[in-house]
Image (cartoon, helix red, strand yellow):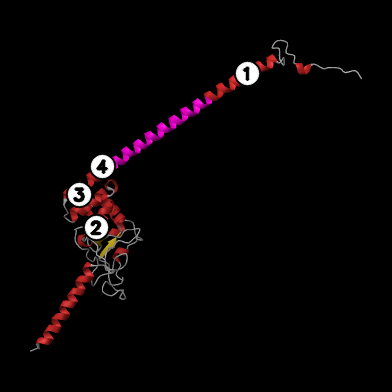
Amino acid sequence: MPSRGAFLLVLSTIVGDTTLVASSTDVNSDGGAYQNILGSTLRSCSYDGTALTGYTRTGYCVDQDDDAGSHHICINLSSIASSGQNFCSVTGQSDWCSSTDMPCHEDPNDSTCAIENWCVCQWAFASYIEKAGGCDAIQEIQCDAINMKALEAYKSNTNKYGKALECLYKRCDLDMSSYSYALSSSMSSAANTVRNGSTATDTSSTRRIMIGIGVALAAVVGGLAYITIAKKRRGRANMMGEDDGSTGWKRDDMTTETSL
């Protein structure tokens, strides 16, 4: 029978290993926690025995400033969609979705793993839904591994990403009242933008009209001033005899002969 000390050592090891596993699942490699769309800590998208995913290849759909594609959506690329096509074929990409020689989640040095769960671009995911024929026609998504940033991005532009937003709400059983609020907020924001744009346009038009009137008035005043000055000059010329106004001769036309 093992001693009490040996038992405690084994128990300590088990607890320690469990803690490490929980840590690697709940927190990304940088040590900072991300939130998933369920409102809890972001879970790892890939897992042991499958290809390692994530923009930073940590297994998580993390948010990175230099990730233009925003790879925040965790989708099961090995699942079967109703259309029979996977994410790659529907979005017009080469079929990397079916790769079986990728670095493994548990050992990146071992390149013998097939892709299963994968962090895909949130913008491509929105296009995928459209091209696949709707939310019900796409492959499975892993809600607890989808970054909250995707939900926030879709909410910021429901006119363009409303279907993707609705799909996440339906597939992940989120509160639809929150979805309705997001739609109304986005529509209100869009309306305000239109109103502000109209006001700015009206103000700009008014300014241009006022400037035009000012230029026209300046031209009229300038013309009147020119006419007035011209009349005064002609009056002075008549008084000096430079032009009698009838014969057309001028004083300058007269010549004087001088005898030597």
Q: Are marks 1 and 2 in contact (CB under 8 Å)?
A: no
Magenta region: 190-219
Residue type indicated by callout 3: Tyr
**Does residue 107 appear in this view?**
yes
**Does residue 133 appear in this view?**
no
Whole-percent x, y for residue 60 in the image: 26, 65
- Does the magenta portion include 138? no
Identity of the residue furthest to the right in this view: 260
The residue at which mark 2 appears reads as 148
Q: Residues within 10 Å of mark 4 (few under 14, many from 20)?
A: few
Mark number displayed over residue 179:
3
Of the 4 image quadrants, the one containing the N terminus is bottom left
Q: Are marks 3 and 4 in contact (CB under 8 Å)?
A: no
Q: Tag 3, which secondary structure?
A: helix
Judged left or right of residue 188, residue 226 is right
Q: Is residue 210 above or below residue 30?
A: above
Which badge, 3 or 1, comes first in the chain's sequence?
3
